Image: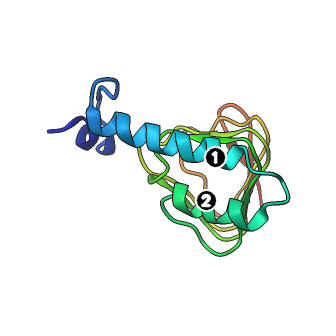
Amino acid sequence: MTEKEKMLLGEIYNANYDKELIEERVRVKDLCFEYNNLKPSEINEKAKLLKRILGETKEKFWIEQPFMCDYGYNIEIGENFYANHNLMILDGNKVKFGDNVVIGAGSIVTKDIPSNVVAVGNPCRIIKEI
């Protein structure tokens, strides 16, 4: 079993010496660097780059700069997703955001949060439905 297969199964894996995982991380870090260095007015270019970085998106979404992730292809975001500045997603496995999910600033999300809720804190927990 490859290190990537172990990673995607949620098992212990070593990403530091696996050529495929290293190349994938470098690729997305370059894309994130490019995204983070676009001018705020370059809205179309930023949207195109986000679609290249992320695994799956809906139509209405936005991530403010700077943004970082490990692989990108494991991230799926729903409709009306918005992330403010300094979003970091450690996506060694699938990370899925549903439609209309509100996560408070500074929250550490360690488990699934359903759509249409407000969740905050460390660890992140639901405080109300919307």
- Does residue 65 appear in the picture of this structure? yes
Q: Residue at 78% across / 44% down in the picture?
A: 104
- Residue 77 or 15: which is nearer the viewer? 15
Q: How is the image coloured?
A: rainbow
Residue flagged by tag 2: what amino acid is it?
A: Leu
Do the residues bearing badges 1 and 2 touch, measured as CB atoms within 8 Å? Answer: yes
The percent position of residue 88, horizontal first and vertical second, equals 63, 38
Q: Residue at 73% across / 60% down in the picture?
A: 62
Compared with 24, 51 (above or below) is below
Residue identified by numbered label 1: 34
Helix, strand or loop at disc 2?
A: helix
Q: Residues within 10 Å of mark 2 (few under 14, many from 20)?
A: some
**Quarter where residue 36 is shown:** top right
Q: Quadrant of the C terminus?
A: bottom right
Q: Quadrant of the N terminus?
A: top left
Comes first in the chain, label 1 or label 2: 1
Residue flagged by tag 1: what amino acid is it?
A: Glu
Residue identified by numbered label 2: 49
Q: Residue at 54% across / 50% down in the picture?
A: 112
